[in-house]
Image (spheres, rainbow, N blue to C red):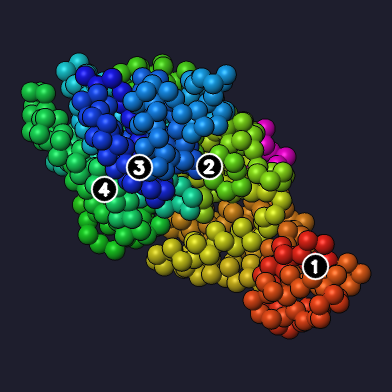
Amino acid sequence: MYRSNVLVCGGTGCTASGSTAVIESFNEAIAAHGLEKEVRVITTGCFGLCANGPIVVVYPEGAFYENVTPEAAKEITEEHLLKGRIVTKLLLQDSTEDGGVSSLNETQFYKKQLRVALRNCGLIDPENINEYIAVDGYQALGKVLTEYTPERVVQEILDSGLRGRGGAGFPTGVKWKFAAASEGDQKYVCCNADEGDPGAFMDRSVLEGDPHAIIEAMAIAGYAIGANQGYIYVRAEYPIAVKRLGIAIDQAHEMGLLGKDIFGTGFDFDLEIRLGAGAFVCGEETALMTSIEGKRGEPRPRPPFPAHQGVFQKPTILNNVETLANIPRIIMLGAEWFASMGTEKSKGTKVFALGGKINNTGLVEIPMGTTLREIVEEIGGGVPNGKKFKAAQTGGPSGGCIPAEKIDVPIDYDNLLAIGSMMGSGGLIVMDEDNCMVDIAKFFLEFTVDESCGKCSPCRIGTRRMLEILERITSGKAVMEDLDKLETLCYHIKMNSLCGLGQTAPNPVLSTIRYFKDEYIAHIRDRKCPAGVCKDLLSYSIIEDKCIGCGMCKRVCPADAITGEKKEAHVIDTDKCVKCGACVDACKFEAVVRA
Protein backbone atom coordinates (compact mmCIF):
# COMPACT_ATOMS: atom_id res chain seq x y z
CA MET A 1 0.00 0.00 0.00
CA TYR A 2 1.43 3.33 -1.10
CA ARG A 3 0.80 6.43 1.03
CA SER A 4 1.05 8.75 -1.99
CA ASN A 5 0.21 8.37 -5.66
CA VAL A 6 1.73 10.81 -8.14
CA LEU A 7 -0.39 10.98 -11.30
CA VAL A 8 1.45 12.46 -14.26
CA CYS A 9 -0.35 13.23 -17.51
CA GLY A 10 0.98 11.06 -20.31
CA GLY A 11 -1.38 12.25 -23.04
CA THR A 12 -0.06 13.63 -26.32
CA GLY A 13 -0.25 17.28 -25.19
CA CYS A 14 1.67 16.80 -21.95
CA THR A 15 4.11 14.39 -23.59
CA ALA A 16 4.91 17.10 -26.13
CA SER A 17 5.46 19.50 -23.22
CA GLY A 18 7.98 17.19 -21.58
CA SER A 19 6.05 14.95 -19.20
CA THR A 20 8.33 11.97 -19.95
CA ALA A 21 11.28 13.88 -18.49
CA VAL A 22 9.10 14.89 -15.52
CA ILE A 23 8.28 11.23 -14.82
CA GLU A 24 11.95 10.31 -14.97
CA SER A 25 12.80 13.16 -12.59
CA PHE A 26 10.15 12.02 -10.10
CA ASN A 27 11.43 8.44 -10.17
CA GLU A 28 15.03 9.54 -9.68
CA ALA A 29 14.16 11.88 -6.80
CA ILE A 30 11.92 9.29 -5.13
CA ALA A 31 14.72 6.70 -5.34
CA ALA A 32 17.28 9.19 -4.03
CA HIS A 33 15.18 9.77 -0.91
CA GLY A 34 14.32 6.10 -0.43
CA LEU A 35 10.60 6.55 -1.02
CA GLU A 36 10.10 3.74 -3.54
CA LYS A 37 7.93 1.68 -1.17
CA GLU A 38 5.84 4.68 -0.10
CA VAL A 39 5.26 6.68 -3.28
CA ARG A 40 4.11 5.46 -6.69
CA VAL A 41 4.34 7.41 -9.96
CA ILE A 42 1.53 6.66 -12.43
CA THR A 43 1.36 7.73 -16.06
CA THR A 44 -2.24 8.65 -16.91
CA GLY A 45 -4.21 10.06 -19.79
CA CYS A 46 -5.25 13.68 -20.30
CA PHE A 47 -6.65 15.70 -17.38
CA GLY A 48 -8.23 18.16 -19.80
CA LEU A 49 -6.40 21.38 -19.03
CA CYS A 50 -3.97 20.96 -21.89
CA ALA A 51 -2.56 24.49 -21.96
CA ASN A 52 -1.15 24.02 -18.44
CA GLY A 53 0.77 20.80 -19.01
CA PRO A 54 2.70 18.89 -17.92
CA ILE A 55 0.14 18.31 -15.17
CA VAL A 56 0.78 16.37 -11.96
CA VAL A 57 -1.80 15.47 -9.30
CA VAL A 58 -0.68 14.08 -5.94
CA TYR A 59 -3.12 11.97 -3.92
CA PRO A 60 -4.50 11.66 -1.28
CA GLU A 61 -4.28 15.46 -0.98
CA GLY A 62 -5.42 16.05 -4.55
CA ALA A 63 -2.78 18.74 -5.08
CA PHE A 64 -2.99 19.79 -8.73
CA TYR A 65 0.36 21.04 -10.05
CA GLU A 66 0.62 22.75 -13.44
CA ASN A 67 3.46 23.43 -15.90
CA VAL A 68 5.67 20.99 -14.01
CA THR A 69 9.32 20.82 -15.08
CA PRO A 70 11.90 18.17 -14.11
CA GLU A 71 13.29 20.66 -11.60
CA ALA A 72 9.81 21.23 -10.17
CA ALA A 73 9.35 17.46 -9.88
CA LYS A 74 12.39 17.30 -7.62
CA GLU A 75 11.06 20.16 -5.49
CA ILE A 76 7.63 18.49 -5.18
CA THR A 77 9.37 15.27 -4.12
CA GLU A 78 11.53 16.96 -1.49
CA GLU A 79 8.83 19.26 -0.09
CA HIS A 80 5.49 17.53 -0.61
CA LEU A 81 6.29 13.82 -0.76
CA LEU A 82 9.12 13.82 1.78
CA LYS A 83 8.12 16.60 4.20
CA GLY A 84 4.38 16.80 3.62
CA ARG A 85 4.45 20.47 2.59
CA ILE A 86 2.41 21.26 -0.53
CA VAL A 87 4.33 23.49 -2.93
CA THR A 88 1.67 26.18 -3.29
CA LYS A 89 3.57 28.25 -5.86
CA LEU A 90 3.34 25.35 -8.34
CA LEU A 91 -0.38 24.66 -7.88
CA LEU A 92 -3.03 25.34 -10.49
CA GLN A 93 -3.61 29.06 -10.08
CA ASP A 94 -7.24 28.97 -8.96
CA SER A 95 -6.92 25.80 -6.89
CA THR A 96 -5.51 27.61 -3.87
CA GLU A 97 -7.52 29.15 -1.08
CA ASP A 98 -5.91 30.53 2.08
CA GLY A 99 -2.82 28.48 1.33
CA GLY A 100 -4.77 25.23 1.03
CA VAL A 101 -5.97 23.17 -1.89
CA SER A 102 -9.62 23.18 -2.94
CA SER A 103 -11.36 20.44 -4.90
CA LEU A 104 -10.71 20.44 -8.62
CA ASN A 105 -14.48 20.43 -9.08
CA GLU A 106 -14.54 23.94 -7.59
CA THR A 107 -12.05 25.41 -10.03
CA GLN A 108 -13.21 27.66 -12.84
CA PHE A 109 -12.27 25.12 -15.49
CA TYR A 110 -13.85 22.04 -13.91
CA LYS A 111 -16.83 23.12 -11.81
CA LYS A 112 -19.36 23.29 -14.68
CA GLN A 113 -18.16 20.11 -16.32
CA LEU A 114 -19.77 16.69 -16.01
CA ARG A 115 -17.33 13.95 -16.96
CA VAL A 116 -18.97 10.81 -18.34
CA ALA A 117 -17.02 9.91 -21.47
CA LEU A 118 -13.88 11.32 -19.82
CA ARG A 119 -14.67 9.87 -16.40
CA ASN A 120 -11.43 7.85 -16.08
CA CYS A 121 -9.06 10.03 -18.10
CA GLY A 122 -6.34 11.32 -15.80
CA LEU A 123 -7.47 9.08 -12.92
CA ILE A 124 -6.17 5.63 -13.88
CA ASP A 125 -3.17 4.03 -15.52
CA PRO A 126 -4.46 3.25 -19.04
CA GLU A 127 -1.87 0.48 -19.44
CA ASN A 128 -3.05 -1.42 -16.35
CA ILE A 129 -6.29 -3.37 -16.78
CA ASN A 130 -6.55 -3.87 -13.01
CA GLU A 131 -7.01 -0.14 -12.51
CA TYR A 132 -9.88 -0.11 -15.02
CA ILE A 133 -11.45 -3.09 -13.26
CA ALA A 134 -11.06 -1.25 -9.93
CA VAL A 135 -13.38 1.51 -11.22
CA ASP A 136 -16.10 -0.97 -12.26
CA GLY A 137 -14.48 -1.82 -15.58
CA TYR A 138 -15.97 -4.77 -17.50
CA GLN A 139 -18.87 -5.02 -15.06
CA ALA A 140 -21.22 -3.70 -17.74
CA LEU A 141 -20.07 -6.43 -20.13
CA GLY A 142 -20.56 -9.07 -17.45
CA LYS A 143 -24.00 -7.66 -16.69
CA VAL A 144 -25.30 -7.83 -20.26
CA LEU A 145 -23.84 -11.29 -20.92
CA THR A 146 -25.34 -12.82 -17.77
CA GLU A 147 -28.54 -10.80 -17.26
CA TYR A 148 -29.64 -9.18 -20.54
CA THR A 149 -30.87 -10.49 -23.86
CA PRO A 150 -29.44 -8.77 -26.93
CA GLU A 151 -32.86 -7.16 -27.48
CA ARG A 152 -32.79 -5.66 -23.99
CA VAL A 153 -29.35 -4.16 -24.58
CA VAL A 154 -30.58 -2.48 -27.76
CA GLN A 155 -33.68 -1.21 -25.96
CA GLU A 156 -31.56 0.23 -23.14
CA ILE A 157 -29.50 2.24 -25.63
CA LEU A 158 -32.69 3.35 -27.40
CA ASP A 159 -34.26 4.48 -24.12
CA SER A 160 -31.13 6.41 -23.13
CA GLY A 161 -31.50 8.76 -26.09
CA LEU A 162 -27.78 8.47 -26.91
CA ARG A 163 -27.01 10.01 -30.29
CA GLY A 164 -23.82 9.53 -32.29
CA ARG A 165 -21.05 11.87 -31.17
CA GLY A 166 -19.22 11.70 -34.49
CA GLY A 167 -21.12 14.55 -36.09
CA ALA A 168 -24.46 13.56 -37.59
CA GLY A 169 -26.14 12.77 -34.27
CA PHE A 170 -27.97 9.67 -35.51
CA PRO A 171 -29.64 7.73 -32.64
CA THR A 172 -27.23 5.00 -31.58
CA GLY A 173 -29.96 2.58 -30.51
CA VAL A 174 -31.69 2.85 -33.88
CA LYS A 175 -28.45 1.98 -35.67
CA TRP A 176 -27.96 -1.04 -33.41
CA LYS A 177 -31.58 -2.12 -33.91
CA PHE A 178 -31.22 -2.08 -37.70
CA ALA A 179 -28.03 -4.15 -37.57
CA ALA A 180 -29.49 -6.63 -35.06
CA ALA A 181 -32.45 -7.22 -37.36
CA SER A 182 -30.25 -7.74 -40.45
CA GLU A 183 -29.71 -11.29 -41.63
CA GLY A 184 -26.11 -12.40 -42.00
CA ASP A 185 -23.74 -15.22 -41.17
CA GLN A 186 -21.18 -12.62 -40.09
CA LYS A 187 -21.57 -9.15 -38.57
CA TYR A 188 -19.06 -6.51 -37.55
CA VAL A 189 -18.67 -3.75 -34.96
CA CYS A 190 -16.42 -0.84 -35.97
CA CYS A 191 -15.03 2.08 -34.00
CA ASN A 192 -14.29 5.31 -35.82
CA ALA A 193 -11.14 6.74 -34.23
CA ASP A 194 -10.13 8.55 -37.41
CA GLU A 195 -10.43 11.99 -35.86
CA GLY A 196 -9.63 14.39 -38.68
CA ASP A 197 -11.13 17.80 -37.83
CA PRO A 198 -8.50 20.54 -37.38
CA GLY A 199 -8.27 21.32 -33.67
CA ALA A 200 -10.11 18.18 -32.52
CA PHE A 201 -8.50 15.74 -30.10
CA MET A 202 -11.38 14.32 -28.04
CA ASP A 203 -11.31 10.74 -29.29
CA ARG A 204 -7.53 10.58 -29.12
CA SER A 205 -7.61 11.54 -25.45
CA VAL A 206 -10.19 8.87 -24.58
CA LEU A 207 -8.11 6.19 -26.33
CA GLU A 208 -4.96 7.39 -24.54
CA GLY A 209 -6.58 7.65 -21.13
CA ASP A 210 -9.27 4.94 -21.04
CA PRO A 211 -8.83 2.38 -23.85
CA HIS A 212 -10.56 -0.47 -21.99
CA ALA A 213 -13.84 1.49 -21.97
CA ILE A 214 -13.89 1.32 -25.78
CA ILE A 215 -13.04 -2.39 -25.82
CA GLU A 216 -15.81 -3.12 -23.32
CA ALA A 217 -18.34 -1.02 -25.24
CA MET A 218 -17.54 -2.73 -28.53
CA ALA A 219 -17.98 -6.16 -26.95
CA ILE A 220 -21.37 -5.04 -25.61
CA ALA A 221 -22.32 -3.80 -29.08
CA GLY A 222 -21.20 -7.11 -30.58
CA TYR A 223 -23.46 -9.02 -28.19
CA ALA A 224 -26.37 -6.68 -28.97
CA ILE A 225 -26.26 -7.15 -32.76
CA GLY A 226 -24.84 -10.67 -32.97
CA ALA A 227 -21.29 -9.82 -34.07
CA ASN A 228 -18.13 -11.64 -33.04
CA GLN A 229 -15.53 -9.40 -34.67
CA GLY A 230 -14.67 -5.75 -34.26
CA TYR A 231 -12.28 -3.27 -35.86
CA ILE A 232 -10.89 -0.08 -34.34
CA TYR A 233 -9.95 2.26 -37.18
CA VAL A 234 -7.44 4.74 -35.76
CA ARG A 235 -5.17 7.13 -37.57
CA ALA A 236 -1.48 6.27 -37.52
CA GLU A 237 -0.65 9.81 -36.37
CA TYR A 238 -1.87 8.78 -32.89
CA PRO A 239 1.08 6.63 -31.76
CA ILE A 240 0.33 6.83 -28.02
CA ALA A 241 -3.31 5.88 -28.60
CA VAL A 242 -2.32 2.98 -30.89
CA LYS A 243 0.23 1.70 -28.38
CA ARG A 244 -2.19 1.79 -25.44
CA LEU A 245 -4.98 0.21 -27.45
CA GLY A 246 -2.68 -2.65 -28.37
CA ILE A 247 -1.66 -3.15 -24.73
CA ALA A 248 -5.31 -3.04 -23.61
CA ILE A 249 -6.41 -5.60 -26.22
CA ASP A 250 -3.61 -7.97 -25.17
CA GLN A 251 -4.53 -7.58 -21.49
CA ALA A 252 -8.21 -8.21 -22.22
CA HIS A 253 -7.26 -11.40 -24.06
CA GLU A 254 -5.12 -12.57 -21.15
CA MET A 255 -8.01 -12.11 -18.74
CA GLY A 256 -10.55 -13.79 -20.98
CA LEU A 257 -12.45 -10.55 -21.63
CA LEU A 258 -11.87 -10.86 -25.38
CA GLY A 259 -11.79 -14.00 -27.47
CA LYS A 260 -13.73 -17.22 -26.98
CA ASP A 261 -16.46 -17.93 -24.43
CA ILE A 262 -16.31 -14.62 -22.54
CA PHE A 263 -17.45 -15.03 -18.89
CA GLY A 264 -18.29 -18.63 -19.72
CA THR A 265 -21.42 -17.53 -21.57
CA GLY A 266 -20.56 -18.92 -24.99
CA PHE A 267 -20.21 -15.40 -26.43
CA ASP A 268 -17.17 -14.87 -28.66
CA PHE A 269 -15.80 -11.46 -29.57
CA ASP A 270 -12.43 -10.28 -30.82
CA LEU A 271 -10.87 -6.99 -31.87
CA GLU A 272 -8.27 -5.81 -34.37
CA ILE A 273 -6.70 -2.40 -34.91
CA ARG A 274 -6.67 -0.95 -38.42
CA LEU A 275 -4.39 2.04 -39.02
CA GLY A 276 -5.59 4.89 -41.21
CA ALA A 277 -3.26 7.07 -43.26
CA GLY A 278 -4.85 10.34 -42.17
CA ALA A 279 -7.38 10.82 -44.97
CA PHE A 280 -10.18 13.09 -43.73
CA VAL A 281 -12.68 11.38 -46.03
CA CYS A 282 -12.20 8.15 -44.06
CA GLY A 283 -14.18 9.76 -41.27
CA GLU A 284 -17.20 9.06 -43.51
CA GLU A 285 -18.52 5.64 -42.56
CA THR A 286 -18.57 3.92 -45.94
CA ALA A 287 -15.11 5.27 -46.86
CA LEU A 288 -13.80 4.04 -43.51
CA MET A 289 -15.25 0.58 -44.10
CA THR A 290 -13.79 0.45 -47.58
CA SER A 291 -10.38 1.30 -46.07
CA ILE A 292 -10.75 -1.46 -43.46
CA GLU A 293 -11.19 -3.87 -46.37
CA GLY A 294 -7.75 -2.80 -47.64
CA LYS A 295 -9.04 -0.67 -50.50
CA ARG A 296 -8.71 3.01 -51.30
CA GLY A 297 -10.83 4.95 -48.81
CA GLU A 298 -13.67 6.28 -50.93
CA PRO A 299 -17.36 6.59 -49.99
CA ARG A 300 -19.99 4.29 -51.42
CA PRO A 301 -23.53 5.25 -52.46
CA ARG A 302 -26.25 4.61 -49.86
CA PRO A 303 -28.48 2.59 -49.80
CA PRO A 304 -27.53 -0.07 -49.03
CA PHE A 305 -26.68 1.24 -45.58
CA PRO A 306 -23.90 -0.31 -43.46
CA ALA A 307 -26.43 -1.92 -41.11
CA HIS A 308 -27.28 -4.16 -44.07
CA GLN A 309 -24.07 -4.13 -46.11
CA GLY A 310 -21.00 -2.68 -44.42
CA VAL A 311 -17.52 -4.17 -44.00
CA PHE A 312 -16.99 -6.98 -46.53
CA GLN A 313 -20.65 -6.46 -47.50
CA LYS A 314 -21.80 -7.79 -44.12
CA PRO A 315 -24.11 -6.06 -41.59
CA THR A 316 -21.99 -3.54 -39.66
CA ILE A 317 -22.38 -0.83 -37.07
CA LEU A 318 -19.94 2.06 -36.77
CA ASN A 319 -19.75 4.32 -33.73
CA ASN A 320 -17.12 6.87 -32.87
CA VAL A 321 -14.96 6.74 -29.73
CA GLU A 322 -16.95 9.19 -27.63
CA THR A 323 -20.24 7.45 -28.40
CA LEU A 324 -18.82 4.13 -27.27
CA ALA A 325 -17.29 5.65 -24.13
CA ASN A 326 -20.83 6.30 -22.86
CA ILE A 327 -22.07 2.72 -23.31
CA PRO A 328 -20.68 1.04 -20.14
CA ARG A 329 -22.05 3.83 -17.93
CA ILE A 330 -25.49 3.59 -19.53
CA ILE A 331 -25.56 -0.15 -18.87
CA MET A 332 -24.36 0.22 -15.26
CA LEU A 333 -26.44 3.25 -14.24
CA GLY A 334 -29.43 2.84 -16.55
CA ALA A 335 -31.03 4.60 -19.48
CA GLU A 336 -32.99 6.95 -17.21
CA TRP A 337 -29.78 8.19 -15.59
CA PHE A 338 -28.30 9.13 -18.97
CA ALA A 339 -31.57 10.59 -20.28
CA SER A 340 -31.82 12.82 -17.19
CA MET A 341 -28.88 14.87 -18.52
CA GLY A 342 -29.01 17.25 -21.44
CA THR A 343 -32.02 18.51 -23.38
CA GLU A 344 -35.20 16.92 -24.69
CA LYS A 345 -33.70 15.83 -28.00
CA SER A 346 -30.00 15.80 -27.09
CA LYS A 347 -29.34 13.63 -24.06
CA GLY A 348 -26.18 13.27 -22.02
CA THR A 349 -22.96 15.23 -22.26
CA LYS A 350 -20.66 16.35 -25.06
CA VAL A 351 -16.88 16.59 -25.12
CA PHE A 352 -15.36 19.61 -26.85
CA ALA A 353 -11.77 20.37 -27.74
CA LEU A 354 -11.66 24.04 -26.77
CA GLY A 355 -9.01 26.03 -28.64
CA GLY A 356 -8.22 29.22 -30.48
CA LYS A 357 -8.41 32.63 -28.81
CA ILE A 358 -9.22 31.33 -25.33
CA ASN A 359 -7.40 31.40 -21.99
CA ASN A 360 -8.05 27.78 -20.98
CA THR A 361 -7.23 25.50 -23.90
CA GLY A 362 -8.16 21.86 -23.46
CA LEU A 363 -10.85 19.21 -23.27
CA VAL A 364 -14.18 20.03 -21.66
CA GLU A 365 -17.21 17.79 -21.14
CA ILE A 366 -20.47 19.57 -20.48
CA PRO A 367 -24.16 18.59 -20.30
CA MET A 368 -26.03 19.18 -23.54
CA GLY A 369 -27.83 22.50 -23.29
CA THR A 370 -24.91 24.40 -21.77
CA THR A 371 -24.60 27.77 -23.48
CA LEU A 372 -21.65 28.87 -25.53
CA ARG A 373 -21.22 31.79 -23.12
CA GLU A 374 -20.69 29.40 -20.20
CA ILE A 375 -18.07 27.48 -22.18
CA VAL A 376 -16.18 30.54 -23.40
CA GLU A 377 -16.41 32.91 -20.45
CA GLU A 378 -16.55 30.54 -17.48
CA ILE A 379 -14.93 27.22 -18.35
CA GLY A 380 -12.62 28.73 -20.98
CA GLY A 381 -11.72 31.75 -18.89
CA GLY A 382 -12.63 34.23 -21.62
CA VAL A 383 -10.76 35.70 -24.58
CA PRO A 384 -7.17 36.76 -23.77
CA ASN A 385 -5.58 40.20 -24.03
CA GLY A 386 -8.85 42.06 -23.48
CA LYS A 387 -10.10 41.26 -26.98
CA LYS A 388 -13.77 40.88 -27.81
CA PHE A 389 -15.34 37.51 -28.59
CA LYS A 390 -16.32 37.48 -32.26
CA ALA A 391 -17.36 33.93 -33.12
CA ALA A 392 -16.89 30.25 -32.39
CA GLN A 393 -16.44 27.63 -35.06
CA THR A 394 -17.91 24.20 -34.32
CA GLY A 395 -17.88 21.03 -36.37
CA GLY A 396 -14.58 21.62 -38.13
CA PRO A 397 -14.62 21.80 -41.95
CA SER A 398 -18.18 20.45 -41.87
CA GLY A 399 -19.48 23.00 -39.37
CA GLY A 400 -20.14 26.68 -39.22
CA CYS A 401 -19.42 29.82 -37.28
CA ILE A 402 -21.55 30.96 -34.35
CA PRO A 403 -21.49 34.78 -34.06
CA ALA A 404 -21.30 36.74 -30.80
CA GLU A 405 -25.03 37.55 -30.88
CA LYS A 406 -25.77 33.81 -30.59
CA ILE A 407 -23.49 33.23 -27.58
CA ASP A 408 -26.44 32.44 -25.28
CA VAL A 409 -27.86 29.68 -27.50
CA PRO A 410 -27.93 26.34 -25.59
CA ILE A 411 -25.62 23.92 -27.37
CA ASP A 412 -27.31 20.79 -28.69
CA TYR A 413 -27.73 19.11 -32.07
CA ASP A 414 -30.88 20.92 -33.16
CA ASN A 415 -29.97 24.40 -31.93
CA LEU A 416 -26.64 24.34 -33.74
CA LEU A 417 -28.27 23.23 -36.99
CA ALA A 418 -30.86 26.00 -36.65
CA ILE A 419 -28.18 28.69 -36.52
CA GLY A 420 -26.19 27.27 -39.45
CA SER A 421 -23.58 25.21 -37.65
CA MET A 422 -23.40 21.62 -36.42
CA MET A 423 -22.07 19.64 -33.48
CA GLY A 424 -19.52 17.72 -35.49
CA SER A 425 -17.13 15.57 -33.52
CA GLY A 426 -16.53 18.35 -31.02
CA GLY A 427 -13.91 20.85 -32.13
CA LEU A 428 -14.71 24.34 -30.80
CA ILE A 429 -12.43 27.13 -32.04
CA VAL A 430 -12.86 30.56 -30.46
CA MET A 431 -12.18 33.68 -32.52
CA ASP A 432 -11.74 37.31 -31.53
CA GLU A 433 -11.94 40.67 -33.29
CA ASP A 434 -8.60 40.10 -35.01
CA ASN A 435 -9.94 37.15 -37.03
CA CYS A 436 -11.12 37.70 -40.59
CA MET A 437 -14.20 35.57 -41.21
CA VAL A 438 -13.61 35.41 -44.95
CA ASP A 439 -10.12 34.10 -44.27
CA ILE A 440 -11.56 31.55 -41.82
CA ALA A 441 -13.95 30.26 -44.49
CA LYS A 442 -11.06 30.05 -46.94
CA PHE A 443 -8.92 28.12 -44.44
CA PHE A 444 -11.53 25.40 -43.96
CA LEU A 445 -12.25 25.19 -47.67
CA GLU A 446 -8.54 24.79 -48.44
CA PHE A 447 -8.57 21.84 -46.07
CA THR A 448 -11.63 20.30 -47.72
CA VAL A 449 -10.20 20.72 -51.22
CA ASP A 450 -7.01 18.93 -50.15
CA GLU A 451 -8.95 16.13 -48.45
CA SER A 452 -11.57 15.47 -51.13
CA CYS A 453 -11.20 11.92 -52.44
CA GLY A 454 -12.22 13.14 -55.90
CA LYS A 455 -14.78 10.42 -56.52
CA CYS A 456 -17.69 12.76 -57.27
CA SER A 457 -17.44 15.90 -59.40
CA PRO A 458 -19.59 18.22 -57.22
CA CYS A 459 -17.03 17.88 -54.43
CA ARG A 460 -13.89 17.44 -56.53
CA ILE A 461 -14.58 20.35 -58.90
CA GLY A 462 -17.15 22.40 -56.99
CA THR A 463 -15.08 22.95 -53.85
CA ARG A 464 -12.13 23.98 -56.02
CA ARG A 465 -14.29 26.60 -57.79
CA MET A 466 -15.51 27.85 -54.39
CA LEU A 467 -11.94 28.23 -53.20
CA GLU A 468 -11.00 30.16 -56.33
CA ILE A 469 -13.80 32.65 -55.66
CA LEU A 470 -12.68 33.07 -52.03
CA GLU A 471 -9.10 33.61 -53.19
CA ARG A 472 -10.30 36.36 -55.53
CA ILE A 473 -12.24 37.96 -52.67
CA THR A 474 -9.29 37.93 -50.24
CA SER A 475 -6.90 39.24 -52.88
CA GLY A 476 -9.14 42.17 -53.88
CA LYS A 477 -9.91 40.87 -57.37
CA ALA A 478 -13.56 39.89 -56.93
CA VAL A 479 -16.76 41.64 -58.02
CA MET A 480 -20.12 41.59 -56.24
CA GLU A 481 -21.49 39.02 -58.67
CA ASP A 482 -18.90 36.57 -57.30
CA LEU A 483 -20.71 36.54 -53.96
CA ASP A 484 -23.94 35.41 -55.63
CA LYS A 485 -22.03 32.75 -57.59
CA LEU A 486 -20.43 31.54 -54.38
CA GLU A 487 -23.76 31.04 -52.62
CA THR A 488 -25.30 29.29 -55.63
CA LEU A 489 -22.33 26.96 -55.85
CA CYS A 490 -22.58 26.18 -52.12
CA TYR A 491 -26.16 24.94 -52.42
CA HIS A 492 -25.41 22.94 -55.56
CA ILE A 493 -22.55 21.11 -53.85
CA LYS A 494 -24.63 20.44 -50.73
CA MET A 495 -27.41 18.88 -52.79
CA ASN A 496 -25.34 16.80 -55.18
CA SER A 497 -22.21 15.51 -53.43
CA LEU A 498 -21.95 11.78 -52.79
CA CYS A 499 -20.95 11.83 -49.12
CA GLY A 500 -20.95 13.97 -46.02
CA LEU A 501 -17.60 15.57 -46.80
CA GLY A 502 -18.91 17.30 -49.91
CA GLN A 503 -22.42 17.84 -48.56
CA THR A 504 -21.11 19.80 -45.57
CA ALA A 505 -18.07 21.46 -47.16
CA PRO A 506 -20.00 24.70 -47.91
CA ASN A 507 -21.12 25.13 -44.28
CA PRO A 508 -18.25 27.38 -43.12
CA VAL A 509 -18.78 29.59 -46.18
CA LEU A 510 -22.57 29.79 -45.82
CA SER A 511 -22.45 30.56 -42.10
CA THR A 512 -19.89 33.34 -42.51
CA ILE A 513 -21.89 34.86 -45.37
CA ARG A 514 -25.02 34.64 -43.22
CA TYR A 515 -23.56 36.40 -40.19
CA PHE A 516 -20.59 38.36 -41.53
CA LYS A 517 -21.72 39.43 -45.00
CA ASP A 518 -20.48 42.95 -44.31
CA GLU A 519 -16.92 41.59 -44.23
CA TYR A 520 -17.36 39.96 -47.62
CA ILE A 521 -18.72 43.23 -49.02
CA ALA A 522 -15.81 45.18 -47.52
CA HIS A 523 -13.35 42.84 -49.21
CA ILE A 524 -15.09 43.06 -52.59
CA ARG A 525 -16.40 46.62 -52.81
CA ASP A 526 -13.97 48.53 -50.59
CA ARG A 527 -10.91 46.33 -51.17
CA LYS A 528 -10.38 46.32 -47.40
CA CYS A 529 -9.99 43.56 -44.81
CA PRO A 530 -11.63 44.95 -41.64
CA ALA A 531 -9.62 42.59 -39.42
CA GLY A 532 -6.33 43.40 -41.15
CA VAL A 533 -5.58 39.78 -42.01
CA CYS A 534 -5.72 39.48 -45.81
CA LYS A 535 -2.28 40.69 -46.89
CA ASP A 536 -3.21 41.60 -50.46
CA LEU A 537 -5.66 44.17 -49.11
CA LEU A 538 -3.27 45.75 -46.62
CA SER A 539 -0.96 48.71 -46.92
CA TYR A 540 1.50 50.20 -44.43
CA SER A 541 2.63 53.78 -44.05
CA ILE A 542 4.46 55.96 -41.56
CA ILE A 543 2.87 59.13 -40.17
CA GLU A 544 5.53 61.80 -40.60
CA ASP A 545 4.46 63.90 -37.61
CA LYS A 546 4.65 60.93 -35.22
CA CYS A 547 7.91 59.37 -36.44
CA ILE A 548 10.97 60.43 -34.40
CA GLY A 549 13.43 58.49 -36.54
CA CYS A 550 14.39 55.92 -33.88
CA GLY A 551 14.97 53.30 -36.56
CA MET A 552 13.23 50.42 -34.77
CA CYS A 553 10.89 49.75 -37.69
CA LYS A 554 13.80 49.79 -40.08
CA ARG A 555 15.78 47.27 -38.03
CA VAL A 556 12.98 44.69 -37.88
CA CYS A 557 11.89 44.95 -41.54
CA PRO A 558 12.83 41.66 -43.26
CA ALA A 559 12.56 43.16 -46.75
CA ASP A 560 14.64 46.35 -46.26
CA ALA A 561 11.55 48.28 -47.34
CA ILE A 562 11.99 51.12 -44.83
CA THR A 563 14.44 53.98 -45.39
CA GLY A 564 15.30 57.12 -43.46
CA GLU A 565 18.04 58.81 -41.51
CA LYS A 566 18.33 58.77 -37.73
CA LYS A 567 16.04 61.32 -36.03
CA GLU A 568 14.25 61.94 -39.33
CA ALA A 569 10.88 60.60 -40.48
CA HIS A 570 11.15 57.22 -42.20
CA VAL A 571 9.35 56.02 -45.34
CA ILE A 572 8.02 52.60 -46.42
CA ASP A 573 8.60 51.48 -50.02
CA THR A 574 5.26 49.78 -50.78
CA ASP A 575 6.78 47.86 -53.70
CA LYS A 576 9.25 46.12 -51.40
CA CYS A 577 6.92 45.73 -48.40
CA VAL A 578 5.93 42.12 -47.71
CA LYS A 579 3.15 43.23 -45.31
CA CYS A 580 4.40 41.19 -42.37
CA GLY A 581 3.40 43.80 -39.79
CA ALA A 582 6.70 43.68 -37.90
CA CYS A 583 7.08 47.44 -38.19
CA VAL A 584 3.71 48.06 -36.52
CA ASP A 585 4.64 45.84 -33.60
CA ALA A 586 8.07 47.44 -33.21
CA CYS A 587 6.96 51.10 -33.24
CA LYS A 588 6.37 52.46 -29.74
CA PHE A 589 5.03 55.79 -30.98
CA GLU A 590 2.12 54.53 -33.14
CA ALA A 591 3.73 56.14 -36.14
CA VAL A 592 3.41 53.06 -38.35
CA VAL A 593 -0.18 52.42 -39.40
CA ARG A 594 -1.91 49.64 -41.27
CA ALA A 595 -4.75 50.44 -43.61
**Are discs 3 and 1 less than 8 Å apart at CB?**
no
* Residue 592, label in figure: 1
Q: Amino acid at mark 4?
A: Val
| Residue at image mark 4 | 242
Label 3 crowding class (10 Å Cα cut-off): few <14, some 14-19, many 20+? Answer: many
Looking at marks 1 and 2 on the same chain, the residue that comes earlier in the sequence is marked by 2
The quadrant in which the N terminus is found is: top left
**Are discs 4 and 1 less than 8 Å apart at CB?**
no
Q: Amino acid at mark 2?
A: Thr
**Are discs 1 and 2 less than 8 Å apart at CB?**
no
Q: Nearer the viewer, mark 3 or mark 1?
A: 3
Q: Nearer the viewer, residue 427 or 133?
A: 133
Residue range highlighted in magenta = 402-408
Label 1 crowding class (10 Å Cα cut-off): few <14, some 14-19, many 20+? Answer: many
Give how far across and how far down residue 214 sits, in percent.
28, 35
Q: Nearer the viewer, residue 209 or 395?
A: 209
Does residue 14 lie above or below 2 as drawn?
below
| Residue at image mark 2 | 361
Q: Which secondary structure lies at badge 4?
A: helix
Rounded to the nearest whole Å, what is the CA distance between mark 2 and mark 4?
A: 24 Å
Looking at marks 3 and 4 on the same chain, the residue that comes earlier in the sequence is marked by 3
**Are discs 3 and 2 less than 8 Å apart at CB?**
no
Label 4 crowding class (10 Å Cα cut-off): few <14, some 14-19, many 20+? Answer: many
Q: Amino acid at mark 1?
A: Val
Give how far across and how far down residue 497 sits, in percent.
47, 59
